[in-house]
Amino acid sequence: MRVLCVGGIVRDDQGRLLLVRRGHPPGEGLWSVPGGRVEPGESDAEAVARELLEETGLVVSVGDLAGVVERPGPDGVTFVIHDYTATAVGGTLQAGDDATEVRWVPVRDLDALPLTPGLLEALKAWNVLP
């Protein structure tokens, strides 16, 4: 079974990347861009905006599709993740929903964090990060 998901790639005016630490499987304890499943009847952009608000407390303006990845999930599920660029336009940064932490991370510090597998490589391949 394939499950459609979205992610939001948000950078601040200092070039830092918005990351959340996952509080539930898959990827529990690992850092990733915020995101989650697309609900029935929801567009990708609506899902990105909802997920970012739920997980980070930030209101975002959703931009372009940066790329698509597929990741294995439990019980034979494949998560098909559409990652979009986004810009924070409001809200208050705070971890919520299934995120245990949220923070702006300087690009130079990304290698020091336990990231979800393939995240850094994908963001570089999509020219989202230097």
Image: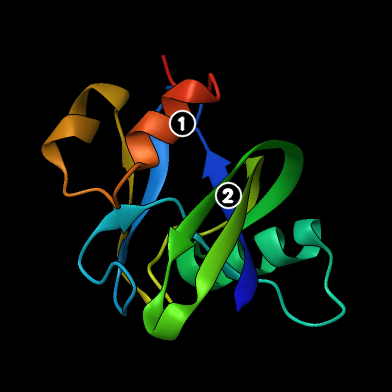
The residue at the point 55 percent across, 25 percent down is 126
Label 1, secondary structure: give it: helix
* Labelled pair 1, 2 in contact (Cβ < 8 Å): no
Report which quarter residue 53 is drawn in. bottom right
Q: Residue furthest top?
A: 130
> Label 1 is placed on what type of residue?
Leu
Is residue 70 rendered to the left or right of residue 66? left
Look at the image and tell me whether residue 126 can be seen. Answer: yes
Q: Establish if 25 lies above or below 52.
A: below
Report which quarter residue 30 is drawn in. bottom left
Is residue 5 rendered to the left or right of residue 34? right
Q: Establish if 36 lies above or below 70.
A: below
Q: Disc count in the image?
A: 2
Image quarter of the N terminus: bottom right
* Mark-to-mark CA distance, 1 and 2: 11 Å
The residue at the point 28 percent across, 54 percent down is 31
Q: Establish if 79 lies above or below 122.
A: below
Q: What residue did someone put label 1 on? A: 123
Q: Nearer the viewer, residue 80 or 100?
A: 80
Q: Residues within 10 Å of mark 2 (few under 14, many from 20)?
A: many
Where is residue 92 drawn, in percent x and y?
50, 59
Q: What residue did someone put label 2 on? A: 8
Image quarter of the C terminus: top left
Where is residue 25 drawn, in percent x and y?
31, 78
Q: Establish if 71 lies above or below 123.
A: below
> Label 2 is placed on what type of residue?
Gly
Q: Nearer the viewer, residue 121 or 48?
A: 121
Where is residue 67 drawn, in percent x and y?
62, 37
The residue at the point 38 percent across, 81 percent down is 74
